[in-house]
Amino acid sequence: MAAAAAMVGDEAERARGRRAALSFAAIAVVLGLPLWWRTTETYRAALPYAGIEGLGRLPLAVPVAVVFAPRSVPGDLPRPLPFTDVQEMDIAVNLRTSVTARYETAYRSTTAQEEAALDVATAQEADAGLHLLQDALLGALTVYVVPETSPLLPQGISVYVGKHRSALVRAGGGLATLRTRLQQLTQVMSFTSSSIAAALSDRLPDGQLGPDARRHLKSSLGYEITFSLLNPDPKSHTVDWDIEDAVNRYVQPVLDKLSLLANFSVDSQILYYAVLGVTPRFDKESSSFLLSAHSLPHVINPVEARLGSSAASLYPVLNFLLYVPERSHSPLYIQDKDGAPVSTNAFHSPRWGGIMIYNVEAPASPQASLPLHVDVDMVRVMEVFLAQLRLLFGLSREELPPEFLLESPGNEGLADWELDRLLWTHTVENIATVSTTLTSLAQLLDKIGNIVIKDDVASEVYRAVATAQSAVDELAMGHLHSAFQASKEAVTSSERAFFDPSLLHLLYFPDDQKFAIYIPLFLPMAVPILLSLAKIVREARQQRKEPTKMD
Amino acid sequence: FQDQAEQFFRSGHTNNWAVLVCTSRFWFNYRHVANTLSVYRKWLKWCCLIFHSHIVLMLADDMACNPRNPKPATVFSHKNMELNVYGDDVEVDYRSYEVTVENFLRVLTGRIPPSTPRSKRLLSDDRSNILIYMTGHGGNGFLKFQDSEEITNVELADAFEQMWQKRRYNELLFIIDTCQGASMYERFYSPNIMALASSQVGEDSLSHQPDLGIGVHLMDRYTFYVLEFLEEIHPASQTNMNDLFQVCPKSLCVSTPGHRTDLFQRDPQNVLITDFFGSVRKVEITTETISLDGDLAGFESK
């Protein structure tokens, strides 16, 4: 009796033991594992991966207005004026990116005021008068078709491009000729497929790009311009340059016009005893010193070390150097690769800046007292420097069809439509940069699992995606200004997100190191649980084998 | 000029940068500091072809002012104290305890706190050719920093991939002079990287010559012979990478130097040494001018 009671007690004891072991195991698995998982995972805020994917397509819309002066309407118009026409052109970039250019052309005839503005003597006056009548948005073009016999355009010229956003085209030849001229005009005044391809250069494989792609300055939020006067021979020349006045008079108007594009800061300095890296050779025929074209690349480097730059700013620096040769090496001229002297006596380096050599006239009498006082002619110097600034940005007036005449922009430095060209390429470049940055950030975060994504990084990414999307939408509608502003904001946000200092991945843990860390913690705890589970399983099996023995 | 221009377009870079890292501390690792400073000096000797602002120099310990240095304020790289590589114009950007794996990775990836000065940043762009030189003590798959932490080859490969994603380099040359150096470039997977190492996995890199006056070894063999090779290069030289791969054969170096070029897009035959060890700018003659009206400028307003 007592033995039976003891056995029942034993049985109850064992059952309780089994329940306890099972409950330990259950708690460890059900509560412990998820708790451990949650407390050791890295915090990663959600990112808009879908939005990032969708930035691949770039539609560009250019609003063009074609205005026909009386007696210039071609006979073969498809419909009576006014009407609109849309032409699309695909610029193939690569598999992921496609750029579509849409030219929305509105054809109409002139108003009375426009006719009055066109009724002047020269094309310049017409251009000035028409500018007052338009409220041209950035990126929009207006083309005025004047009769074939109009005196506005000189002989042999059939297209005149003004300083603002309008052009005059000579009528004649029917609609097909007009269309060809229109196409050429839009290529000149807005963008060409190669300029768009150059803006997207980091998405194209190297082989497809021309050399142009690497020349022009990349789009940036600001640029620093430094003017330096190099005087290697202060014993012979005391050089005075009124740089402050020159910057205020000539450089500032150009920078004011470019202020839409980026922030500019200007500074200047004078360097003494700075020599060029190359010794010029003496040419007996012209009794002057010559620098040949192939020695020019070596000229800049020793000087560059001494130029310095602002410690605080991270913007790209454009250096413009004015070099006054030593008395023993005067006069100094640059030769181009054919051996002819260069009229500007200047050369420039893409993405860096330019150098101009300023020769001092020899004094009238050889007994003149040294040092000679030199007053630099800042107009001549600034003409070259500003031209170099234009070339560095990619505004060149060289490849044009012969019947085109471009108005010189004068002291403003660049025409309105040239500013538009820069805005088009920079907007496209900005959007492409945002897309690439965010895509690579997403790939990176996907690949390296233990980078922490903080909330403010995530919010920057969301903002970048939203502003980039609005930039693309504005481009599709032809609003260049708002598209550019949105693209700038998008670039700022995406760069801030990508380069956030908190995105450093935790040091790499190979799998064997992970085991080495967790085993000493979990193994001692797991051993009793596993052993008791094993015991329970063994007993359960035994019981099933001998159920009848208890009888 | 035309040929040079063509060549320039082939390489596609417009500026050069360098990151030189010495990762060892303590007086007996004098040779690592001397290695790094000699490589640094090699550039500046070439008439400032790459200048201080384009070099990020990281030295983990100060040998010149070390109390055990019998010739203070000098670091010699040649026996009989022929060449002091620690002159007046050395600019060390990261010194002593600032040389950590984290700072090194921050410099490479650009994820630097905003308060960092310009000289401590790698401001390269997509047209930069970068040279990265590392020296110190290493093992199979890792490089020791400061005797307390390591950088693994996987982390280095990931850092280079991040640089590639953000287009922070055009081409990258990675030179490492440590024991089992070849293991450090095994895991690279980003394009346009060429790597050289002083020894294969399982081999040690040996030092070159002790100096009895200073009491330590002054340089490592591989770096010594590489620099001897670079002595003969001048800015216009046409020597290519294949010649650099032949430097320091087993008879001189005792270890077998290795290199890796499969990730590089161009043929090493066409890659000039000066693409990485020099800086030649592309120039164009300015033929256009604009016309400014000197008198009217004051009155014309936009």
Image (tube, rainbow, N blue to C red):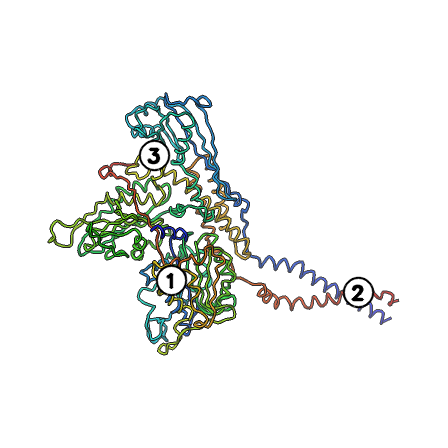
Within-10-Å neighbours for mark 2: few <14, some 14–19, many 20+ = few
Residue named by callout 3: A402
Whether callout 2 and callout 3 share a subunit is answered yes
Q: Quadrant of the C terminus of chain A?
A: bottom right
The amino acid on which the numbered mark 2 sits, given as a three-letter code, is Arg
Q: Chain of mark 1?
A: B
Q: Secondary structure at mark 2?
A: helix
Q: Residue at x 31, y 34 (%)?
A: A407
The number of numbered badges drawn on the structure is 3
- Residue A119 rendering spot, x and y as whole percentages: 31, 23
- Residue B16 rendering spot, x and y as whole percentages: 38, 56
> Marks 2 and 1, Cα distance to the nearest angstrom?
72 Å
Q: Is residue A267 visible?
A: no
- Residue A20 rendering spot, x and y as whole percentages: 72, 64
Q: Nearer the viewer, mark 1 or mark 3?
A: 3
Q: Chain of mark 2?
A: A
Q: Are marks 2 and 1 in contact (CB under 8 Å)?
A: no
Residue named by callout 1: B93
Q: Secondary structure at mark 1?
A: loop
- Residue B7 rendering spot, x and y as whole percentages: 39, 53
Judge whether A178 appears above or below A297 on screen: above
Q: Secondary structure at mark 3?
A: loop
Residue A382 left/right relative to A57:
left
Q: Is residue A395 visible?
A: yes
The quarter holding residue B36 reads: bottom left
Q: Quadrant of the N terminus of chain A?
A: bottom right
The quarter holding residue A160 reads: top left
Residue B120 left/right relative to A461:
left
Give me the disc on residue A541. Answer: 2
> Marks 1 and 3, Cα distance to the nearest angstrom?
55 Å
